Image (cartoon, rainbow, N blue to C red):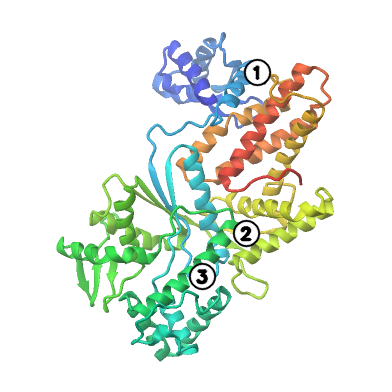
Amino acid sequence: MKKLMEHMAEELSAAFEKAGYDPSYGKVTVSNRPDLCEFQCNGAMAGAKAYKKAPFMIADEVVANLGDSSVFSAAEVVKPGFINLKVKEEFLAEYLREMAADPKLSVSEAQNPKTLIIDYGGPNVAKPLHVGHLRSAIIGESIKRIGRYMGHKVIGDVHLGDWGLQMGLIITEVKHRQPELVYFNDSYTGEYPKEAPFTISELEEIYPCASAKSKEDEEYRNEALEATHLLQQGRPGYMALWNHIMEVSVTDLKRNYDNLNVSFDLWKKESDAQPYIPDMVEEMKKQGFAYEDQGALVVDVKEDSDTKEIPPCMLLKSDGASLYTTTDLATIVERMKLFSPDEILYVVDKRQELHFIQVFRCARKTGLVNEDTKLSFLGFGTMNGKDGKPFKTREGGVMRLENLISDINEEMFRKIVENRSVKDKDAKETAGIVGLSAIKYGDLSNQATKDYIFDVDRFTSFEGNTGPYILYTIVRIKSILNRYLEEGGDSEAGEILAPVNDSEKNLMLQLTGFGATVENAFEEKAPHKICAYIYEVSNAFNSFYHETKILSEEDKVQKESFIQLLKLTRNVLETSIDLLGFSAPERM
């Protein structure tokens, strides 16, 4: 269905054309003076120079052609030539009736659906998820959901780090602790144990211990480097140990991502790209792109337009070992072969921008992607504490993600119990639902590329621009609708009528923006635009609720109209929070 703005622009464009002016001047924007009008058109100002005419004269002629408009109830010229507009109440009601009947609530589904792969996980195996993993997961998850809602084929890939030095460090430390294990016996030819020789808790202690040792003991570090090399060469005992590490780690990662309501279609790993590396490197050498520089194999990726130095993209180190750039390039080869995507989007810390500039340029230069395949980098900012520094525990360490979620849930539980709004037996479950909204909305409401302050007190508040406030609004609407049913009302009866007061009209106008907001959020990969939108809708609904007697309305037809408007508001808000990756409870 057409957007409200499109209906208005059509009317204005026709009026400009009828007055003898270019119809392209008929663009309409939301008014920056809502006290004066709802929308405005500045086309007469833009056309004044081209037509050598005072803008208010052009505007007067255009407005004269809007006298019998089916869209506008008022069109007024304000010097020096602005056209102030108000929408007809009945036209607005008709638009919302059409929107309520549309399964997509006015969002236009993609005419030519694209295949988009989103790389939005990137945790390293054998390490616990920490707050640094939060943003990639929830921004990527939201973009995935928005893209699918618009009809695109979106594939989410966690892209695990499982093939680097951390594996050699773990293998080395396990060998030092338990040298008798069969994994380290070169002459062993039997089946390796099915049970891992460590738990996830032990594994999470082993890695930092090994990492610390490697920084102080060069011999230990060299042993770990050799173990990494042997693993990558396919040594059977090390491969069996690696499989244990993967199984234990991935089980724990899935549990943690489930707690965030984040899911992936692919659980691909760096190691999955390994088979593609030899042919890829050989081809780059054969085509003359790759050359040796101080023993390493590199590809030049600098461009004449560069204003800063862009170093060559390194494919292999002097000892022949691969790097992140190598596996990222080989992963592109794999993705092109398996999925032939129209776009690959990386949702990654913005501090990795140079790495991805090198990878993207190398992939394009060497023909790893089609000319029309888009490679995109969404670099997000840092999540900081109130001190403006990266978020830490009270002891100054990096906070585990499950501890952050637990702390938020406890805070929400305390507030819910204080409010006595939910029975004790339901309070824990409700706290988990509302806590997730606090975390996700607190993050997503900020522009992804910017750093932000993670303020637990503010994010868990039921007032202001927060997740709990949005959920509280949805729960309030659900409560009214449930009471209406309990009082014998028919939720299917009636239709949305013209607004009876300014607050109702404002709510109706806000609802019309859903389709454009979702489409724009996907186009710009900007979930924060949906957050800003639903905050405005929530404010508009709460103003309407406080100023209007809904359930005590005596006119049955009018009451049914209010109920249909509430249903549409609930549907818009619930669809929006699902696109953001969280849900609303029945009570709060």
Under tag 3, what secondary structure?
helix
Left or right: where 263 falls relative to 482: left
Question: Residue 191: percent from the left, percent from the top?
Answer: 39, 78
Q: Which residue is mark 2?
A: 453
Question: Residue 451: percent from the left, percent from the top?
Answer: 55, 58
Question: Residue 395: percent from the left, percent from the top?
Answer: 66, 76
How far apart marks 3 and 2 lie (CA) works out to 33 Å
Residue type (three-letter) at the residue carrying disc 1: Glu
Whichever of labels 3 and 2 marks the residue nearer the N terminus, that label is: 3
Picture quadrant where residue 494 is located: top right
How far apart marks 2 and 1 lie (CA) works out to 42 Å
Residue type (three-letter) at the residue carrying disc 2: Ile
Residue type (three-letter) at the residue carrying disc 3: Val
Callout 1: few (<14), some (14-19), or many (20+) C-alpha neighbours within 10 Å? Answer: some
Under tag 2, what secondary structure?
strand
Residue at 51% from the left image edge and 69% from the top image edge: 249
Picture quadrant where residue 539 is located: top right
Q: Which residue is mark 1?
A: 89
Q: Which mark is residue 275?
A: none
Residue at 76% from the left image edge and 33% from the top image edge: 482
How far apart marks 3 and 1 lie (CA) works out to 60 Å
The residue sitting at the front extreme is 190
Whether pointer 3 and pointer 1 mark residues with C-beta atoms closer than 8 Å, the reply is no
Q: Which mark is residue 248?
A: 3
Whichever of labels 3 and 1 marks the residue nearer the N terminus, that label is: 1
**384, above or below 91, in the image:** below
Residue 309 makes an appearance in the image: no
Residue at 68% from the left image edge and 30% from the top image edge: 567
